[in-house]
Amino acid sequence: MILLICVCYYCLAIIGCFFRYYFKKFSESDYKYNKSLNCKRICYVIYCYFIMAYSVFLHELVRNEVILNLPFLISVILIAVVYVFFSSSLEFAVNSNRKKKRKWK
């Protein structure tokens, strides 16, 4: 069962990297004018949060000595940090409508 959890985790992490490659080519204005792309981006940010929560779950398994493998713990922490970067880099378009308007004198 533990092996299945670990394999599923790595597969989800690799699939997320392919999604990140897909979203890398778009700019903020693309998300503003394309509602379906914006919906996909929001789903990907939720996916990143899911991977981070899964990382916390696996970290707890390692901490409670269910999984006794130091390289696995290091990879879990590394993947969690990478997904924090992935999700934060795509969240910029969530608050794009709240930008402060400049007043011209």
Image: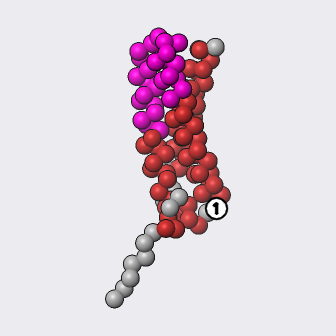
Please provide the residue range marked out in magenta: 55-83
Number of marks in the rendered image:
1
**Residue at the (49%, 15%) spot, across then down:** 64
Please provide percent x and percent y for residue 76.
46, 26
Is 74 one of the magenta-colored residues? yes
- The outermost residue toward the bottom is 105
The answer to whether residue 32 is above or below residue 84 is below
**Residue at the (50%, 29%) spot, across then down:** 56
- The outermost residue toward the front is 64
From the viewer's perspective, is 100 left or right of 6? left
Q: Secondary structure at mark 1?
A: helix
Tell me the crowding category of disc 1: few under 14, some 14 to 19, or many 20 or more residues within 10 angstroms, Cα based.
few
Q: Quadrant of residue 19?
A: top right
Which SS type dominates the magenta stretch?
helix
Mark 1, residue position: 35
Please provide percent x and percent y for residue 42.
59, 51
What amino acid is at disc 1?
Lys
Quadrant (top left/top right/bottom left/bottom right) for the N terminus: top right
Quadrant (top left/top right/bottom left/bottom right) for the C terminus: bottom left
Please provide percent x and percent y for residue 40.
62, 51
Residue 14 visible from this viewpoint = no
